[in-house]
Amino acid sequence: MELPAVNLKAIILVHWLLTVWGCMNYVFPASYAWGNFSVLAVGIWAIVQRDSLDAIMMFLSGLLLTVLTDIIHISVFYPPNKYLADVKRFSIGMAIFSLLLKPVSCYLVYRMYRERGGEYAFNIDLESSSDSHFAHNGVTRAGWDRSTYEPIDPQDAPPQ
């Protein structure tokens, strides 16, 4: 079953709305708002630069990181039942709904990353780092697919 194509703008709009609703009653500290809104700003960068792998990868990494920080914020700052007014209950509910929706958004953003040309392989390029003395014999390109390599040097005709 193929999932329908979801626009990156729709993902950002939904998470922006849920974050605004999650922040509207000061249940969470400012770090909740700063973290979520800054990741959404990176998502806007991914919209503006459609061909950039860095932008979509940073947005995906930020979404994954905010899953962890949202769990910490909700678990640490959840108020006791006697202090839960209806507005606070709504605000926390929207933050929880945003948290539950983020893994689906991460999957959809990952699909967009693949459509933009991202790859599954995990590349470690030690030659470009300052620790180049550790790079030798295949350790430098872990996961690099060598089967698609095509030499571009002109081939010499065999001697007759």
Image (cartoon, helix red, strand yellow):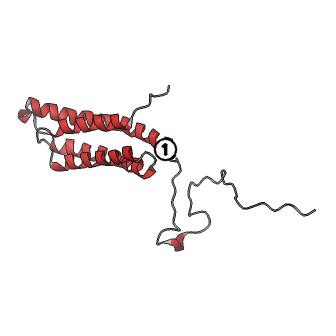
Percent x, y for residue 14? 28, 34
Q: Nearer the viewer, residue 72 or 52?
A: 52
Percent x, y for residue 19? 22, 39
How packed is label 1: few (under 14 Cα within 10 Å), some, or many (20 or more)? Answer: some
Helix, strand or loop at disc 1?
A: loop
Q: Nearer the viewer, residue 156 or 17?
A: 156
Q: Residue at x 52, y 46 (%)?
A: 117
Indicate whether 43 appears above or below 84. Answer: below
152 sits to left or right of 38: right
Q: Nearer the viewer, residue 67 or 59?
A: 59
Indicate whether 68 appears above or below 101. Answer: below
Percent x, y for residue 137? 62, 66
82 sits to left or right of 138: left
Quadrant of the rendering where the C terminus is positioned: bottom right
59 sits to left or right of 153: left
When asked about the image quadrant of residue 91, the answer is top left
Percent x, y for residue 109? 41, 40
Residue type, numbered disc 1 = Arg
Q: Residue at x 50, y 68 (%)?
A: 128
In the rendered image, the residue lying farthest to the left is 82
In the rendered image, the residue lying farthest to the front is 48
Q: Which residue is mark 1?
A: 116
Total marks placed? 1
In the rendered image, the residue lying farthest to the bottom is 133
27 sits to left or right of 136: left
In the rendered image, the residue lying farthest to the top is 1
